């Protein structure tokens, strides 16, 4: 790339990329795209959008797994209009909500993806176009509805134009829309590049999903803005990861703590170590959920490079603080020092507190969103004297390293996926047998937090926890479905007489369920358990000793899990989320989740 001047817009970034011939994008099944190739692909998407009547102020929703065409579609849509990537795991009712809220002019869907997003868009008269990678073309070239997009004009965009909108889980039942300008995004990309000393020599393995701010800014914009290369496999697959390290030789990757834990497991074998040795890693980065100091030690011992833990949020276009690279000091258990925006601690009354005092983490800087879209009330509440209130509680030490100590906002952080408990409450309360429902986080040794709920039934009505889980699974994405639901006579209240989510897990004695590792000999006791046990035994090539044995301890991995999912899809016509294998990796657990999903489908019908 020609010029190191930092562009303030994604359009400016594309202009810079146009002059580059280094590798920009590598993926599993396509030739490498140079910086110029990627810019051309993104500009052609922008041109195609213009040709379809999409204007600067319009929104373009994208539903796609990570791929080369997703990268070009994001860059093109953010340049020509406002881009709104959505989680491809959402179900029909969530797409109904998000498309209704966003009112996009056009929905871009990955051509190979079977998703209810298409029907949800059609029901709202939103135009749908299918995007994919052009056959025999370099990685990054995009087809729209089967033909290669061929615009050549880079639409002008200014730093204040909104490039991206993302929903936050919010603390109210209605998720809020965060509008991020080009300036917000590019400032954050440059902040991350500066923290990590990114350069044209860096190769980043993109395993974070590209519908989340962490993936879009840390794993896509920051490396490209530094003139480096991004490697884009179709998402995170633990079983493939070591092979990707050896094949693509990345210098770093950013991930959430659960991914790091899975990677440590894979790289601990002799085979894993040999593949790992082929990648010239400089460091690995963790963000979006708390990383325990013990996990940092494990990662550093197995992966053999420094772990850089950072703290980010959607409203800040991701990064707020980060531990620095060595030789500067990293402090495990802290999220590091201000890494872009100014960071301070504020009292509930709005005063900036001295070092060592506990309060709300507040930030200000060019990366911070101006407010929430069409929501003056929430926007006003989010700012005090120009500082954005994060809703996280923390304390700064004498060296200004930040320790997060809790959350003032009611948010469940399930391995980096944020869940608004009120959204789940609302769905549970819609069940005809439910009088009152309250959802809360429970601590979980692997996920950090998991979702649980307590429910009071209407007099004379009955429903099982399982029936309630089916009801929620029919309406919300799988990761939001409470793993445990307790039916109670009344929900315990706090000292003030108010319902309080905090402390409910202890009061009701609800603990995370962690599966047995070995030694179980329980035989299958239902047709679903028999089907699952037979599928596992076939694909693992061994007998399954008991329905409570852990899939991964039996030699399973995420690739085998994916094959089992596809076999179950064929035989039972149900889409089991791959996540279920990590949540409940036993025959009994998977059979029970299948039962929930089959029941949930009944609700749809
Ligand atoms: P999101 O908007 O999905 O990026 O979520 C932002 C929230 O994730 C923050 O407000 C924190 O509550 C949490 N979070 C982000 N990074 C960390 C971290 N390193 N440690 C603990 N919590 C984090």
Image: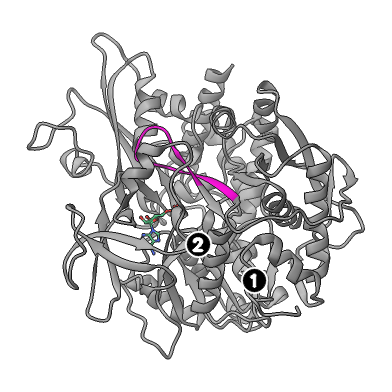
Q: Which of marks 1 and 2 is in front?
A: 1
Whereabouts is ligand 1, in terms of quadrant? bottom left
Front residue of 213/50: it is 50
Characterize the local packing of mark 1: few (<14), some (14-19) or many (20 or more) Cα atoms within 10 angstroms. many
Tell me which residue sits at (34%, 40%) in the image: 171
Query: In the structure shown, which secondary structural element does the residue marked by tag 2 occupy?
Result: helix
Residue 69 visible (yes or no) = yes
Ligand 1 near label 1 (Cβ, under 8 Å)? no
Residue 541 visible (yes or no) = no
Which residue corresponds to mark 2? 259
Assign the C terminus to one quadrant of the image.
top right
Give the x, y percent position of residue 283. 52, 80
Characterize the local packing of mark 2: few (<14), some (14-19) or many (20 or more) Cα atoms within 10 angstroms. some
Give the x, y percent position of residue 71. 71, 57
* Res 173 quadrant in image: top left
Q: Is residue 167 magenta?
A: yes
Ligand 1 near label 2 (Cβ, under 8 Å)? no
Which residue corresponds to mark 1? 225
Front residue of 358/5: it is 5
Q: Does the magenta stretch include residue 352?
A: no
Q: Distance between the residues labelled 1 and 2?
A: 25 Å
Residue at the limit of the structure toward the bottom, as seen here: 327
Assign the N terminus to one quadrant of the image.
bottom right
């Amino acid at each position: 790339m020609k010029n190191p001047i930092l562009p303030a817009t994604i359009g400016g970034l594309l202009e810079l990329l146009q002059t580059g011939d280094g590798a920009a994008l590598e993926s599993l099944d396509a030739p490498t795209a140079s910086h110029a190739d990627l810019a051309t692909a993104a500009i052609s998407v922008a041109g195609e959008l213009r040709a379809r009547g999409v204007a600067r102020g319009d929104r373009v929703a994208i539903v796609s797994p990570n791929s080369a065409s997703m990268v070009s579609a994001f860059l093109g849509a953010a340049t020509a209009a406002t881009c709104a990537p959505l989680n491809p795991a959402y179900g029909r009712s969530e797409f109904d909500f998000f498309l209704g809220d966003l009112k996009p002019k056009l929905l871009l869907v990955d051509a190979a993806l079977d998703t209810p997003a298409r029907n949800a868009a059609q029901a709202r008269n939103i135009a749908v176009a299918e995007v994919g990678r052009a056959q025999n073309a370099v990685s990054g070239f995009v087809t729209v509805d089967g033909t290669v997009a061929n615009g050549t004009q880079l639409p002008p965009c200014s730093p204040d134009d909104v490039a991206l909108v993302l929903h936050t889980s919010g603390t109210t039942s209605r998720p809020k829309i965060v509008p991020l300008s080009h300036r917000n995004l590019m400032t954050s990309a440059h902040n991350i590049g500066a923290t990590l000393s990114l350069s044209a020599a860096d190769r980043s393995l993109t395993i974070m999903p590209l519908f989340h701010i962490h993936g879009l800014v840390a794993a896509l914009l920051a490396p490209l803005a530094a003139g480096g290369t991004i490697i884009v496999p179709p998402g995170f697959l633990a079983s493939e990861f070591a092979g990707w390290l050896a094949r693509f030789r990345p210098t770093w990757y950013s991930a959430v703590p659960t991914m790091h834990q899975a990677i440590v497991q894979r790289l601990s074998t002799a085979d894993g170590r040999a593949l790992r040795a082929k990648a010239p890693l400089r460091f690995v980065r963790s963000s979006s959920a708390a990383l325990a100091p013990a996990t940092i030690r494990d990662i550093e011992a197995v992966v053999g490079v420094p772990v850089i833990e950072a703290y980010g949020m959607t409203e800040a276009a991701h990064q707020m603080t980060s531990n620095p690279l060595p030789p500067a000091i990293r402090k495990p258990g802290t999220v590091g020092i201000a890494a872009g925006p100014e960071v301070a601690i504020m009292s509930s009354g709005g005063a900036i507190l001295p070092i060592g005092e506990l309060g709300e983490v507040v930030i200000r800087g060019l990366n911070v969103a101006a407010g929430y879209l069409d929501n003056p009330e929430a926007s006003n509440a989010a700012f005090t004297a120009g500082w954005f209130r994060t809703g996280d509680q923390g304390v700064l030490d004498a060296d200004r390293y930040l320790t997060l100590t809790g959350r003032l906002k009611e948010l469940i952080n399930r391995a980096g996926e944020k869940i608004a408990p009120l959204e789940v409450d609302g769905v549970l309360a819609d069940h005809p047998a439910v009088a009152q429902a309250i959802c809360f986080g429970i601590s979980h040794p692997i996920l950090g937090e998991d979702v649980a709920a307590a429910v009071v039934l209407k007099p004379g009505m009955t429903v099982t926890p399982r029936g309630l889980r089916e009801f929620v699974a029919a309406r919300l994405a799988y990761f939001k479905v409470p793993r445990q639901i307790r039916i109670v006579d009344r929900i315990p209240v706090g000292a003030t007489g108010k319902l309080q989510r905090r402390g409910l897990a202890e009061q009701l004695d609800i603990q995370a369920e962690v599966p047995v590792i070995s030694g179980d000999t329980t035989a299958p006791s239902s047709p679903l358990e028999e089907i699952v046990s037979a599928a596992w035994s076939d694909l693992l090539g061994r007998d399954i000793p008991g329905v409570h044995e852990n899939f991964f301890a039996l030699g399973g991995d995420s690739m085998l899990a994916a094959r089992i999912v596809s076999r179950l899809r064929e035989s039972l016509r149900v889409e089991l989320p791959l996540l279920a294998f990590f949540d409940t990796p036993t025959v009994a657990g998977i059979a029970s989740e299948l039962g929930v999903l089959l029941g949930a489908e009944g609700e749809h019908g």
